[in-house]
Amino acid sequence: RREGRGTVNTDTPHRVAMTNGGNNPASNRKNGGNEGTEVSSHRSYCSWYRLGILASLAAVLALAVSLGVVLSNGNSSGNNDGDEADTASVVSTERAPSFDAKIAAQRPNVLFISVDDLNTWIGYTGRNPQTKTPNIDRLSSMGVSFTNAHAASPLCNPSRTAVWSGIRPHVSGCYKNYENWKKYIAEGLGLNSHFKANGYFTAGRGKTYHLSVRGKDGGQMYASEWDDYPKMSEWNVTPPIHRSAGYFKDVETDLEEDDDPDWHTVDYCIDRMLDDRAEPFFLACGIYKPHLPWAVPRKYYDLFPLDEIQLPPHLEDDLDDVPLYAVENMSKPDEDYAKIMKRGRWKAAIQSYLASVAYADMNIGRLLDAYEKSPERDNTVVVLWSDHGWHFGEKSHFKKMTLWEPASEVPFIWVVPGVTTPGTICDRPVDLMSIYPTLCDLAGLDIPDHAGGANIRPLLEEPDANWDGVALSTMGYMNHAIRDQRYRYIRYEDGSEELYDHLIDDNEFNNLATDSRYDSIKERLSVYLPPESINMKPWKWGPAWKEKLTCGEYDTIVKKCDDGNYVARDPNNFCMFLDCPTSVR
């Protein structure tokens, strides 16, 4: 496996969203003095897509000449003159016409594997030698695995909403867990919706979107964006498993492997992957483990004897040099950490988590077995990701919901036939916002303007390429972390800061933010912080919510907020907002 040094592109509020054939202007900036050549992020299609287009186009043109017919563009969405009704109809729920279907048939399938609450305690990262994940590591050996990948938010709902919509939390305003993400994201913007509109069969099961376990008709997804998405199976256990089982209390129920809903999610995905159909598939497999409860068959606990459990690196006084805001709003040591310590369950909780990870890995292995036997294997892109990490006592914290490394860092694996090299490692800083534009590129689809993440295809092709950029994570309103190749910089809503040098302090024990010698580092990284963030008032944007209006000197997209005020998107930078104090006409 190759390991490299360098930098990588990212989506920041200062970056113009990439479009067809566009280069990323941010890629010309150098990161932290690292030397390297500029790397163009131009679009290039997969070989199977180019050949498919040429063959299909030749066949259709020959048919047109012989029959003397005039080909229609087949656009069922109607003209878009800017009003709400027409813009809403741009995303069609109907299958693409025959000509587009022929093109789509040449495109790669997508197997999209999300794993809930999985931190980087997996084999290929080397983060925890106790873990046993032979199947995730098998997938890692097939393609490119990232060791410096981060969630857009260290919390389920905002993280998943950002991945699926391509819109960051500070842009959408979706920061919280217990609310419907559809308040913030309009119908037709989802990654699956974009693939469906381009001739893909879209299906899934399990936890992909937040609360998607209820199925496409369960109120937590847009049903029009899926061809098939059944409700997740129930636990096959009586009495029901307690939510805190394995965490605050022991697991008291003996389970079989197929008692867990994940078993049946994988069964469904295997069946859909092996179905015989003309169109390519976009198949989302949402593995719920290792989300709580950490209840799995006993044999998985036996893999990790309690007396052999190792605790993660931690310091008793680790919060002494972090801002009070971080202690009160991120660490919250008097909550889960205090409960775990009081009940003496630190090692028991780690044992239960490792057992749950091993169970999730087993199910991923079942899915990979079917993938490797599939006749479509060589025409299928595989992506594995987690929505965020998980703390186990670091910074006196358990769970997620912080801007420190254990909560933001995630596993991230890509297998792309003809593009990725088996068994390669990329240590460039990326975040999960890269998924939407990169998958579009690999499938030969246009990258929508709202998908503002970095296209990381150049890193899939050459993992040790010099590339400029950072990863951006957001936890709540105006709380952001920037991660580059070496440093983590955090700035909170009240202006307080943290800075860690991962070259010499991978556990983030020493906050350097108050050391004046690092002022230039903070200044450089602060450029990547969002200049503005949307407050938590629920207002969404998308095709049905856009208005073409004139706002002062700007003729651009204007949004009316709940309070009656207007904001406008900068026509030169899709991620920037402009004040709109003048009358809107």
Image (tube, rainbow, N blue to C red):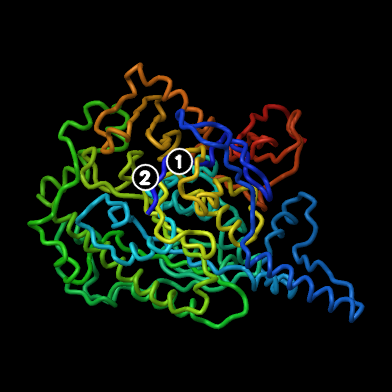
Q: Please identify the quarter of the rendering in which residue 552 is found.
A: top right
Label 1 secondary element? strand
Quadrant assignment for the N terminus:
bottom left
| In this view, 456 is above or below 271 | above
Foreground of the two, 381 or 290: 381
> Residue at left 24%, top 70%?
240
Q: Where residue 471 is drawn, which disc sits there?
A: 1
Contact (Cβ within 8 Å) of mark 2 with mark 1: yes
Query: Which numbered dot is residue 408?
Result: 2
* Camera-nearest residue between 420 and 286: 420
Separation of disc 2 and disc 1 at Cα?
10 Å
Q: Secondary structure at mark 2?
A: helix
Residue closest to the eye, 40 or 202:
40
Q: Amino acid at mark 1?
A: Ala
Does residue 286 appear anywhere in the picture? yes
Residue at 62% x, 79% y is 278
Q: Which mark is residue 141?
A: none
Farthest residue to the top: give it. Answer: 516
Taking the spot 58% from the left edge, 68% from the top edge, the residue there is 108
